[in-house]
Image (cartoon, rainbow, N blue to C red):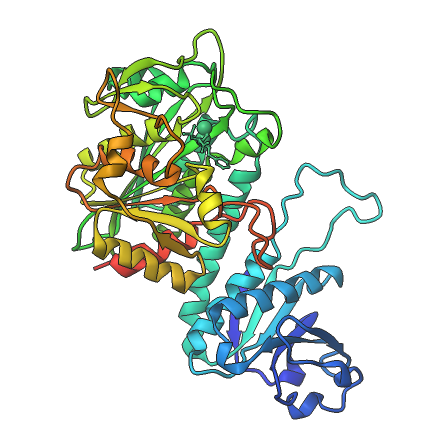
Amino acid sequence: MDVSVSQVEIPTVDADLLAVGLCEGEELPAEFALAPGAADAKGGFKKLAMLHPERPTRVLVVGLGKRKELDAERARIAAALAAKEAGKLSATSIAWALPSSEDDAALAEGLVTGTILGAYRFDRFKGKDPDDPEPSVLDSLTLLAPDSVAGTAEAARVCAEAQNRARDLQSLPSNVATPSFLARRAREIASAHPAVSTEVLGREEIAAKKMGGLVAVSQGSTEEPKLIVLRYDGGGSGKTLGLVGKGVTFDTGGISLKTPAGMHEMKMDMSGAAAVLEAVGAIAELGLAIDLVAVVPSTENMPSGTAIKPGDIITQYNGKTVEVNNTDAEGRLILADALAYAIELGAERVVDIATLTGAVMIALGSSYAAVISNDDVLAAEVEQVGRETGELVWRLPLHHEYKALMKGTVADLTNAAAKRKAGTISAASFLEEFVGETPWAHLDIAGTAWDVGRAYTGNDANGFGVRLLTALAQSLAA
Ligand code: BES
Ligand code: MN
Ligand code: ZN
């Protein structure tokens, strides 16, 4: 989407639709007070009214609620509602008058993010309507705002568009978005940015490196696994940040097969990978002064005659042995190798992001992702950027008693605890065995990657993590 910041007067604005916000108990701008439709304008949050003044011809009034509650998140929601209205009107351009507030930058970010995410559609597999061969696309946003927000608006555009690309990766079915497809996407990102390089290992190289977790999970599938490494050299003077994303392109559960209901959603078990790949792209596009090493282990998890079986014992990349008592707890096996590898490649602090446990949906629903960390400073940074981006995270604890749940009976570890206790934390406790003393934060996004239902996310894939990881890189850049 083309995003620009302009200071033109409202009557001269050149857009198919102008959106203005109205807070509860406040008056419309004088130029619209007498326009047809003005009597319907309400300040209640999410209330919509269409006005028809002479110039511009269509003005959408979006209720913003109480002024003291007006923040970036409300702006995202308001903007998404306006983008949906623009869609109904087949408008291809929208202008937003920045509501007055104490934090112009926060609202500008919210309006840009909400417009771009709200206008997103995944319809490439739908047949074209013969009467409307080219459905209209909202492709231009003008913010009527002071020039001081131009940088913020541009950064928000970059992040939101990267997030929409992550949504595409999530939504693409597993027969399209294979591990090889994700590897090609990584190469595309690297070729678009001189500071990004990539290296991809295939089945034989993964085996030769003795990445036993990725070998075990992928051995049931004829689809070739890929271990994707992306490096970004931003010339930072701080610590190298490692990003690790779970890239299971389809999770059947393996021999510990899942039930059919909802299994199709497991095409999105690569949501962490999507977030990492597209965040690296956004970070590079923004030119942030940080050095990154991103590792994406990608595979299908399939049952077959060659699949790993419950009780099999494997040796992970760092030498620890694991009894695979449940082949559906596959994410931790591939992340374990990837975390150890990222640290070996130079990550001095590391964040992993994964649709790891159904239990996190029970604990936190779709409003917060879980963050679990061995480092209070890193955890606090992640919580802070979560608040800023609206990609909220809630910290859950680590404790040696949880670690004890993951002890193996005949190997060092088990991948599935015997009792169904603390599913999200016990998974993280397993991962903790592979990071040593390196500051690490684990994000469990199984509840937040899709089916969230905010105005700007919808209920489908929402690219959770792209803005969070990019904002984290921004805040750690030095
Ligand atoms: N990919 C799933 C977790 C998941 C479930 C994500 C639902 C999104 C929606 C993961 O691989 C898994 O199957 N986890 C198991 C672990 C258990 C066997 C210890 C789970 O959560 O049930
Ligand atoms: Mn699974
Ligand atoms: Zn999984």
Q: Is residue 111 visible?
A: no
Q: Nearer the viewer, residue 243 or 375?
A: 375
Residue at 63% over, 83% down: 10
**Residue closest to the far right:** 131
Q: Position of residue 3 (x, y in %)?
A: 53, 65
| Image region (quadrant) for ligand 3 | top left
**Residue 306 shown left or right of residue 450 in the figure:** left
Q: Is residue 119 above or below residue 373?
A: below
Q: Is residue 46 above or below residue 219?
A: below
**Residue 293 shown left or right of residue 277 in the figure:** left
Residue at 64% over, 89% down: 29
Quadrant in the picture for the C terminus? bottom left
**Residue 285 shown left or right of residue 432 in the figure:** right
Q: Position of residue 106 (x, y in %)?
A: 44, 72
What count of labels does the image hold?
0
Q: Is residue 340 visible?
A: yes
Q: Is residue 254 above or below residue 381?
A: above
Q: Position of residue 100 (x, y in %)?
A: 51, 83
**Residue closest to the far top:** 305
Q: Position of residue 315 (x, y in %)?
A: 25, 18
Q: Residue 140 sits in which quadrant?
A: bottom right
Q: Nearer the viewer, residue 157 or 310?
A: 310
Q: Nearer the viewer, residue 151 or 327?
A: 327
Residue at 38% over, 25% down: 226
Quadrant in the picture for the N terminus? bottom right
